[in-house]
Structure formats: C-alpha cells, structure tokens
Image: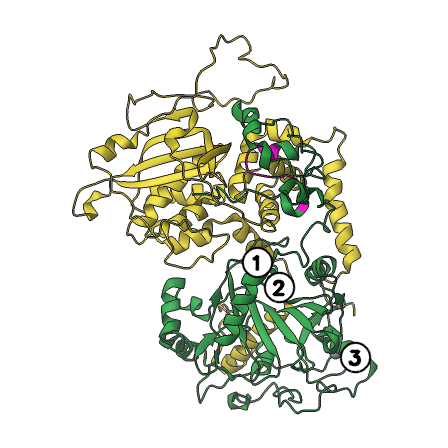
Chain colours: A green, B yellow
Amino acid sequence: MTDRGESDDDTLRTGDGVDAGESSTAAETEAGESTTGTETDAEDETREGLESDGGVSEPAPSSPGVAPESVDGLLEGVESAGIEGYNYAYLDEHTKREVRRATLKAIAIPGHQVPFASREMPLARGWGTGGIQVSLSLLGPDDTFKVIDQGSDESVNAANIRRLAETTANVDPTRDTTAASIIQTRHRIPEEVLTDEQILVLQVPTTDPLRKVDGSDDRNRRRHAHQNYSKMWVSLYENVVEWDEIQIGAAYPVLVNGRYLMSPSPIPRWDTPKLHQAETLFLFAAGREARIYAVPPHTDVEPLAFEDKRFQRERFPEACALCGSTDTYRTEVETDDGKRLYACNDTSFCEKRQRDPSIQKAHHVDRDVGWERLEEPAVDAANDGGEGR
Amino acid sequence: MGYVAVEAGEEVIERAEQLFEKRRTEGESDPVSIDQIDEQFGRLVGQVMNEGGLYAPKLAARALKQAQGDTVEASFLLRAYRSTLERWDDSVPVSSDEMFATRRVSPAYKDVPGGQILGATKDYTQRLLDFDLDGGDDPTADWDLEEAEPESLRNVLEILREEGLLAEPSAEDDGEDYDTTREPLVYPAPRSAILQELARGETGAITALGYSTLRGYGSVHPTLGEVRVGSLPVQIEHPYTGDPVEVTSVEVSECESVVPEYEKRDDAQFSFGYGLVFGRNERKVIGMSILDASTQLEGNEPVHDTEFVCQIVDGVDSFGFIEHLKLPHYVTFQSTLDRIRAIRERTADGGDSPATTEVSGDD
Ligand SMILES: [Zn+2]
C-alpha cells in the first residue's frame, strides 16, 4: 500500500544499516554514520526489541570475520564517508539505466513525452531535477560539463547543480560553451553554435503545451496519439482575434518532425529556431512531471503560426551595453540611477565578445547554420517582418 | 558583470548554508538530540516518515533536526536519501486484522467486536495551554497493568462486507502493486498507485482536500467504520524456505470509511474508502480514506478528479515548484515584456491598451 518492502535494505550504499523497522533504529542509533550492516542474520532477534513501542532496540552485533561473500562481509567493505558514499554520478545504476532507456525511446520518437520514474534528487523539484537526472545518467569521467541558469553559469542554482555533478561524477566543469561535452540549461540555448559532439539537456517545468487548453494528462495523451491539435490551434486563433498577436512569450509551442506538438521548455522565442535541423542532440527533462523528450539532430522543428501571423522573435531596441552585440538575446537592466540598459543574457559569450568584438557565433565551426547571423527585426517592424519559416 | 541580479559562486552558497546552520545553533540552550526528537516529537517523526515514504524513525528525526522542524523539507531529505537506495524485496501482504492496535474507535457502531479502544489521545480533553509542562514524570507509573497478549481485532467493516452492503473497489488484474517510486505515474492510474500517492501526500493537502468535500465541494461525507493506530507486522518470504517470516513491525494509522453513494449503482451498496499511513496521523488517514472514495466516484468537483488529487497532494512536488518561483526568471520575463509591448504598440492608436493580460510560458 505504502512503501512496504521498499526500504528493505539501504545498507549496501552507505553501510548505515538503515532499514524499515527496528533494524534501522538499531543501526541509526549511532547517528547512522559508520555502523556497518546489522540486520540480515539478526532479524528475528531484533524483533523483540521493538515489541514495546516501535522504539529503539539494541544494535545487533555484526558478526566479525564473516565470509567475504556474505552480505555482512560486503557491507564491511563499504565505509560511509558523506558524498563519497554515494554511487558514481549519484544515481544508482538501475536508475541510470532506466533514465537512459527513456532517453533512447525519446530520441526514437522525436517530440514524444516519455514517462520515467523520476527520483527524488538532492535538489528541490522544479529546480532542475529532471535535467540533473538525465545529465548524471550520461556523464562519464571524461566529460566536460557546463550548467547555465537563465543564461548564466554563475547563477546560484546552476552553481549548485554543477557542484553535485563535480562531486559525484568527477567531471570537469567549464563555462565555455564550445568546450563542454554536455550542457545542462534552464531556459536558454547558448548563443554559440552547438556541434554534433555536444548534448544540450534542457530543464522543463511544464511538459505539455496542451496543458494550456486542457489540464488533464489523460486526455492530452490521447490528443497526442491522434495528432489532434485542434484545440491548440483554436486557442492560438482566439489569441490573434483578441490581441492581434500570438501572445506567447517563452516556451513557444513547436511541431517536431511534422508529428508531435512539443514545448521547447521556456526558452525565449529567440532560441526556438536553433532547434531546427541542428547538429546537436537536445534532451528535455522534467523531474516533477516525470517526462523525458528529445529533438535529435537534423530534425524539423517548426513553431506553430499562421500564414498571416508569423512566428516572431523578441526585439531589442539597443545593443548590449557591455559588448555591443546586436545579434544576441538581451535582458534589460534597471540601474541604480534610473537608466535602462540592455545586456547579453549569455554571459559566457558576452565575455568572449568583450575581449574580441568580431567573434561570430559560428567561429568554431565551418558551416553556416542560418540563424547565427540573424539580426533581430527592428522594433517597429510590421508583423510579417518576423522570420517565420 | 554586475548586472545579473542573482549571481553567486560556490562560496556564497556555502556561506548561505552556514548562516542557515547558525540559526539552529545560536541559541543558548543545548542542542536537541536525535533521540529526543524521535521520542518526544513522535507525531512529527511519523508525519515525515509517511510523507517521505520511508519507515526509519531515527532518520526522520535526523531530517527534522537538519530541516529545523520544517516537515516538508524533512520528508524531502528522507526521500532524496531513499532514492539512492536499491529496492530489494516486497513484503508479504498483511491483513490489518493482525495489527496490534493501541487505539481503535468505531464511529459507525456503538459496540464492535473487540470493543472500542480509546488508547492514547487528547481528543476529549480540554485544549488548555499547559504552563506546568516541564516534568519528565510518567503519569501512568502507578497503573496496575497486566501484561496483555497482543489481540487481533476483526475489522468493523467485515460486518457490512458479510452482508453484501459494501461495494468492493474493482480488483486489479495482475495482483502486482504499482510502485510510483519505481514506475512512472500515468493516468488513468491503478488504485494501488493512487493509494501510494495519497499515503505519501502532504498532511495539510490531504486534510484540506478531504475537508473540501465535507464542506460541499464534492459528494463524499463518510461514516468511519473505524480508525486504528497500532503496530503492523512486516513479513517477507524467507529466501530459502519461501515461508513468510516476520522481520519487523511498523507503527501505522488506518482508517476505513463507508460512503452512502449508492444511488449511482444498480445494486445499492456503500462505497468504500481506505487510508493507511506510517506513524500516528489520524487526520491524514481519515482524509486519505475520503479521497480514496471520492476519486472512485463521479463528480465535477476537484476531489472527484483523480489526476487533480494526485498531482496536488504531493508535498515535495508542490513545495519545490512553489519555491522555484524564487529562481531568476529574467529571460522568460523579457520575452513576456516583448509581447506586452508589441500588443501595446499595436493598440496605441485605439486608446488605452489592455492592461492585464495573461502571458503564458513564464515558468
Ligand atoms: Zn554582450
């Protein structure tokens, strides 16, 4: 009913001897730190200690000198030492395998949301737990890992996620987009062109674009199965009627591979074209909603729009106050003296531009990807000035 | 760069953590021990274990200490720890008849087989703040008690069941219980998954949603067959002999309720709601039985929508996402600003522009 049987043996990992019921309380008595396995042989005996009130019983003695193939023998080899006591890359191997399976399935069906049994992570849900599960299932000791939150490597939550990967998976951290093999990101795709040797892991808060038109996951899964997106189109149409604009800010819904309606996660519309026919594998992961989906390389990704109401990217009235860029996503900054400035959101690339203003987004690749030289439309551009495809 | 509002390196994070830790240690009293929390805050420990989905009193007490008493944070710590552990086995299903009940009340009947057992409760005492609450004396010290044999109590609802008055929830086909910590929860979900989600639900959320239907937002107003608190044996199959072996026991609260919702059925029967959680938590277990019943019954109110109930009650989900709003959102906010300005420019000629507009995607 609840989790009976679940907590049966916690001991292999840290050697806490933690367990459901009294064998746990026994081992935990010493602060759960370094007691090695106490149960297995001692179950029946320790039962007595509990009869009274489910309280603490005496720690069952672990038998010294047991054969190495016994559980106790194995447990004695496991020393609890804080984070070092955890498995490589934090997740146990079963979990990693499950996440990888879901990921492979997601790649095989571009844009389709694949359920997986999302684990509780040492980060709060909604703070990148899906992303970190996917990242940790992919990372190996040779990887170089970059984490950005809303464009910044130094944002506190990005630093926290990076620290978890560094301490549990021994990866090298980097802030340089071109040097990373795996990049975990919240709400941005970096400005510099990504290559076929990189994977971008995007954190997703709300997986289904249809949620807006119907709260039920059950009904929306049926709609996806039948490719029935009429409710979404009606909603966009009503949007245009009411506001004369498609009034979606970030997380602009896209059609993937001509088949599945997908939320690209709350990236700005600025980044949406980067998903189309890219070299890179994009993985989207939602921990709280327990879904993984993907845009594999060389896949069509098309923002929903009407012929006479095209998809539009964000417009910025000024260049970056720091590096002078006019071809990057900028956010406005209100200064203490009441002025409004614009600055690049991708801080890593802005710093490169500050050192070398001529550096291009595709400086490290020898191909033209189309979007990297796009200037934003002028602020007063007519509606059809957008770059809908 | 000095422009990005929330930027910090690891040192800043570490210092924030140290400041948090200081809050716990800066008072002049002695640090509270894990044992003290376990023994003297049993209700809290029970809540953390049932919301955390792990029966481990000492770990729950440790989590409470670490979280400075925040129950949701503590159950989150417990879950995050548990998610790193392998799952080795299932216990054998056990009937709650086998529970060693320390408390059992049956509101449905005046007299029940085995009798009403009031047990340890404050239900019927006056809630006066006690200014003499310092002593460690046991007021039952001079009670004259015989050592009682654990007595198994027949479930009150068996009476109705034998008479055919109780509609049994539809049985699941394969007999395998669904474990939402190991299998993704998709809807429609099997009842074992729903019960697991309810059992791990946040106490306040379960209470509030359960109350909502009593208050008129739903059609369930149950009669409780019984509420029990006691210790339930945990058995596993012996790896060699295959016989069930009792390895431990867990303190649980249990509630069975009947709902007179028979008008929707061809054969007039009571509907049935079940609740069971770790530790002592009677209001949660009653709320759980209401929600178990309501999600099996049709209705337009939130409590009858299984997806809604399961999505909303999880404290770790709701706490995480509510608090994630503190994270920076300037990328998405900029995108939203752009849309609103575009609409204002377009409507500038037509007088006042729309002032309030719900712009989505700002997550
Ligand atoms: Zn810049």
Q: Nearer the viewer, residue A129 or B73?
A: A129
Query: Dot 3, crowdedness within 10 Å: few (<14), some or many (≥20)?
Result: some
Tags 2 and 1 touching, CB below 8 Å: yes
Q: Quadrant of ligand 1?
A: bottom right
Q: Secondary structure at mark 2?
A: helix
The lab-note entry on whether marks 1 and 3 share a chain reads yes
Query: For the magenta stretch, what is the residue range?
Result: A14-25
Q: Secondary structure at mark 3?
A: helix
Q: Which residue is mark 1?
A: A95
Q: Quadrant of the N terminus of chain B?
A: bottom right
Q: Mark 2, chain letter?
A: A
Residue A216 visible? The answer is: no
Q: Sequence order check: which comes first, mark 2 or mark 3?
A: 2
Answer whether residue A293 is magenta in the image: no
Q: Mark 3, chain letter?
A: A
Seen from this angle, which residue lies furthest left? B266
* Label number found at residue A352: 3
**Mark whose residue sits in front, 1 or 3:** 1
Above-or-below relation of B265 to A310: above
Give how far apart the Cα atoms at labels 2 and 1 are. Answer: 8 Å
Give how far apart the Cα atoms at labels 1 and 3 are. Answer: 38 Å
Residue B188 locus on image (x, y percent) = 36, 58
The lab-note entry on whether marks 2 and 1 share a chain reads yes
Q: Which residue is mark 2?
A: A137
Residue B98 visible? The answer is: yes
Tell how many labels.
3
Q: Mark 1, chain letter?
A: A
Q: Residue at x 46, y 23 (%)?
A: B121
Q: Sequence order check: which comes first, mark 2 or mark 1?
A: 1
The lab-note entry on whether marks 2 and 3 share a chain reads yes
Q: Residue at x 71, y 91 (%)?
A: A366
